[in-house]
Structure formats: C-alpha cells, structure tokens
Image: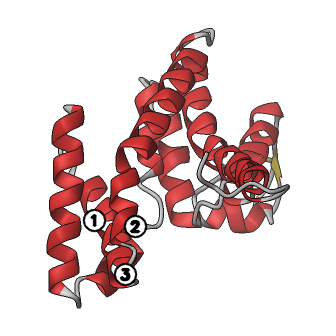
C-alpha cells in the first residue's frame, strides 16, 4: 500500500538508503494514518486526498486547508439534474437565495453542488426538501464554528491546518452517523417524525 501512496503522491518519499530501499520515520507513519483516515472513514477519493495532503504540506498551511476537502457529492448529481431544466432553475434559485440570506460567498462549486442535490430532490417530487435548507445551514454553521474552535486550539499553524482538515473530513462521517441515530430515535418507538 505504501508504494501506491507514493505513486499517488499522497505520501512523501522516505530517505533513500539505496536504489530500492528507503527509510521512513514517525512523520511518515503519521501521514499514513492521516491518508487512511481521509480515504477510509472520510471517503475522499485518492485525487481529493492528494489535494488535501498537498495543502497540508504547504510551508504556510492554515485551517483554510480544510476548504480543499470540497463540497460533497453534489457535482456528481449536478450533471444528471441539469437534464431537467425546470428543476435545475428552481433548485439554483433556492441555493442562491440561501447563500444570499446567510451572507455566504456564492462559491460556484458549492452553489452548483447544492443546486444539484436540490434539483434531484425536485425531480423526485420532493420540492419541500428545499424548505429544510435553513435548518441544514444552521446545523452546518454550528458544526463549522465548533471545528474552527477545535483548530484554533492547536499548537502551531500546521497542527491547526491538520485539525481543520481532519475535523472537516471525519466530522462529515460523524455527522452522518449522528443523523442516522437521530432519525432512528425520531421515527421509532411511536415517533411520527413530526416533533
């Protein structure tokens, strides 16, 4: 697996002993654990994980390195959703209105990802899901503020950058698990999902 990580430029090369052997130190062990977290529970593609690792290797790495993680599955959904122009236009309007209401910068990739997801829901006749966007945004903002606080508590810029990336990637997995637990609690034991 180490050779794959080296070829993929996820792992920095070790110190060459000869033409076929290299020595690896504790920093490489740490990189391996981070790579496995990003591509395992974090579910990042090798390409996206490489971008994250490269951002963390920058001499002036900062918590903004977490922005390299990206915007989730939206872009993959966007192409399929664009086939249905009406759903796409309504979804784009809903996404833009949300970003504007929040005072968030209208990042093209994020707006496109959000539009793609909402357009797919609209295409399934679940237009009402867009009414939940503010609740999702409230949760997201609270989570990101908590992650920023976690990163700010690090000792040094590189440690803060790594904390920001790890909390962004693994935080998504944690959120998915907690949402599943909350849904189970909401919809079982007589719950009607309306509380």
Which is more toward the observer, 8 or 92?
92
Distance, label 1 to label 3, CA atoms, is 15 Å
Task: Please report contact status of discs 1 and 3: CB closer than 8 Å, yes or no.
Answer: no
Q: Find residue 91 and report its image quarter.
A: bottom left
Left/right of residue 176 with respect to residue 114 in the rendered view: right
Which is more toward the observer, 37 or 11?
37
Q: Secondary structure at mark 3?
A: loop
Left/right of residue 158 with respect to residue 15 in the rendered view: left
| Identity of the residue drawn at 82% across and 35% down | 25
- Whether 9 is drawn above or below 86: the answer is above
Task: Please report contact status of discs 1 and 2: CB closer than 8 Å, yes or no.
Answer: yes
Which is more toward the observer, 9 or 186?
186
Left/right of residue 143 with respect to residue 96 in the rendered view: right
Q: Give the image location of residue 88, x and y in percent.
A: 20, 76
- Whether 147 is drawn above or below 165: the answer is above
| Identity of the residue drawn at 61% across and 18% down | 150
N-terminal of the pair, mark 3 or mark 2, is: 2
Q: Give the image location of residue 63, x and y in percent.
A: 47, 26
Q: Secondary structure at mark 1?
A: helix
| Identity of the residue drawn at 40% across and 76% down | 76
Which is more toward the observer, 136 or 188?
188
Q: Give the image location of residue 178, x and y in percent.
A: 72, 46
From the image, tell me which residue sits under label 2.
74
From the image, tell me which residue sits under label 1.
115
Distance, label 3 to label 2, CA atoms, is 18 Å
From the image, tell me which residue sits under label 3.
125
């Amino acid at each position: 697996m180490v050779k794959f990580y080296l070829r993929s430029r996820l792992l920095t090369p070790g110190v060459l002993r000869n033409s076929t052997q290299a020595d690896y130190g504790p920093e490489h062990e740490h990189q391996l654990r981070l790579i496995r977290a990003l591509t395992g529970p974090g579910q990042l593609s090798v390409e996206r994980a490489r971008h994250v690792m490269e951002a963390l290797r920058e001499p002036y790495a900062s918590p903004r390195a977490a922005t390299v993680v990206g915007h989730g599955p939206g872009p993959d959904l966007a192409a399929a959703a664009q086939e249905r122009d009406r759903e796409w236009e309504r979804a784009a309007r809903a996404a833009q209105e949300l970003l504007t209401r929040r005072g968030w910068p209208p990042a093209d990739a994020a707006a496109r990802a959000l539009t793609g997801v909402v357009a797919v829901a609209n295409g399934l006749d679940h237009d009402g899901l867009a009414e939940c966007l503010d609740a999702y945004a409230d949760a997201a903002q609270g989570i990101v503020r908590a992650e920023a606080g976690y990163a700010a508590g690090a000792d040094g810029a590189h440690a803060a950058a790594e904390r920001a990336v790890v909390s962004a990637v693994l935080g998504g997995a944690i959120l998915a698990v907690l949402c599943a637990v909350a849904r189970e609690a909401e919809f079982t034991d007589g719950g009607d999902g309306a509380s």
